[in-house]
Image (tube, rainbow, N blue to C red):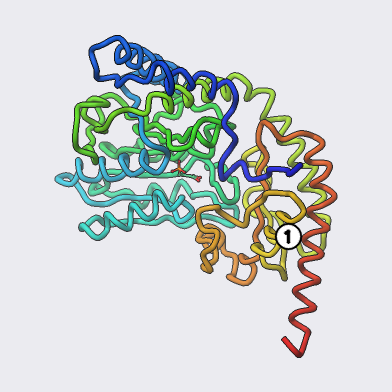
Amino acid sequence: MSIYLDHAATTPLRREALEAMLPLLTEDFGNPSSVHGPGRRARAALDEARERTASTLNAEPREIVLTAGGTEAINLALKGIAWAGKAKGNRLVTSAIEHHAVLHTMRHLEKFGFEIVILPVDRYGRVDPDQLDAAITDRTTLVSLMLANNEVGTIQPMADLVSRVRAHRGVAIHIDAVQAAPYMSIDVRDLDVDLLSIAAHKFEGPKGSGALYLRHGTILLPQIQGGTQERYRRAGTENVAGAVGMAVALELAGAERGDVAPRLAKLRDRLRDAVLALPGVELTGHARKRLPGHLSVIALASEGTAVAINLDLASIAASTGSACTTGSTEPSHVLTALGYPDEEARGSIRLTLGRTTTEADIERAVELVPQTIARTRNAAAVVAGDALT
Ligand code: PLP
């Protein structure tokens, strides 16, 4: 049996979500905009999913815009706020370790005359609240920051960062909570944010389903034109089954978090200790302020890709840095921003646990992961020293 340790990339769909989705994909397949019975049943399911999603996030149902995943929610947030605020200002602030859904969207906006300010982070991936404060001018309309990082698991000092933004009037704040949502309580009122993105597939919901929380009264320019769905903010026939699966998975993740998060942190720590016992292996990201199931390391003198392939051969699914940049020869922008030189960043490996990870999985990983890293290093050293290759 293979051991899946790549929950930051995606998670399996949980049974309760699948079971809630099935009727919407079969007998209750109607279009929620239709007036007939099947349409009305789909509408009722969609309304309920929106209400449940809103309630879990402590938002109002009208503040939830259903999207096709995290990337779309983030695009809507960033482009929507940037264009709606263009008359007031063109300065947008973010950090160097954001997901490409944020950074590439910012780069796209730059081509249209927006000024993008990318804040540095410290060795552990944290944004300095003073630097954030100093970056905001009267031309700033938006700050976008992630609550937890996908590659190194670091959690931002968000309350402090948000309060710095709030000290400036008229600046919207968007939080990318895609990685944080499964493991941290997301209360949009407590967080005091204007926009927040989540993606269902990170918390055992379906892929291609997400949501943007948009605080009531926040003006945003819609990015997809068409019908009147989502109160004109996101046109297109709704993914009813996806919304239902997301609502169920989000609710359950919230209800179980109190048990799951400490259990995962304990298992993660056991694996961390075993991996860090190898010479030349160091933890990346913050030692304590990090997601509970998240372990990221750099194994010096090794290629993360080779380690991940060898782990796969040993039936452990892991990743090197972010799944989205796997296959690219560029070192991870996150590790570069944390100050790691390219040759060290190449040795990055990420092992991420999820609710379905068992103690037996970790016992096996504790044996196999250090072995595999050591073996991959030795093989690389032999090839490097072989005059014929
Ligand atoms: N933001 C973060 C922090 C992520 O980790 C991801 C996915 O890996 C995304 C955004 C994009 O979400 P999606 O895959 O649903 O488009």
**In what quadrant of the picture does the N terminus appear?**
top right
Q: Is residue 389 above or below residue 143?
A: below
Residue 385, x across and y down, in percent: 78, 84
| Horizontal relation, residue 25 to residue 214: left or right | right
Closer-to-camera residue (168/122): 122
| Horizontal relation, residue 365 to residue 63: left or right | right
Q: Residue at x 29, y 39 (%)?
A: 171
Q: Residue at x 19, y 34 (%)?
A: 226
In this view, the residue farthest toward the bottom is 387
- Ligand 1 lies under 8 Å from the Cβ of mark 1: no
In this view, the residue farthest toward the front is 27
**In what quadrant of the picture does the C terminus appear?**
bottom right
SS assignment at label 1: helix
Residue 169, x across and y down, in percent: 27, 37
Q: Residue at x 30, y 15 (%)?
A: 39
In this view, the residue farthest toward the top is 37
Q: Residue at x 58, y 43 (%)?
A: 8
Q: Quadrant of residue 183?
A: top right
The residue carrying mark 1 is: 310
Closer-to-camera residue (311/256): 311
Report the number of discs: 1
| Amino acid under disc 1 | Asn
Closer-to-camera residue (229/217): 229
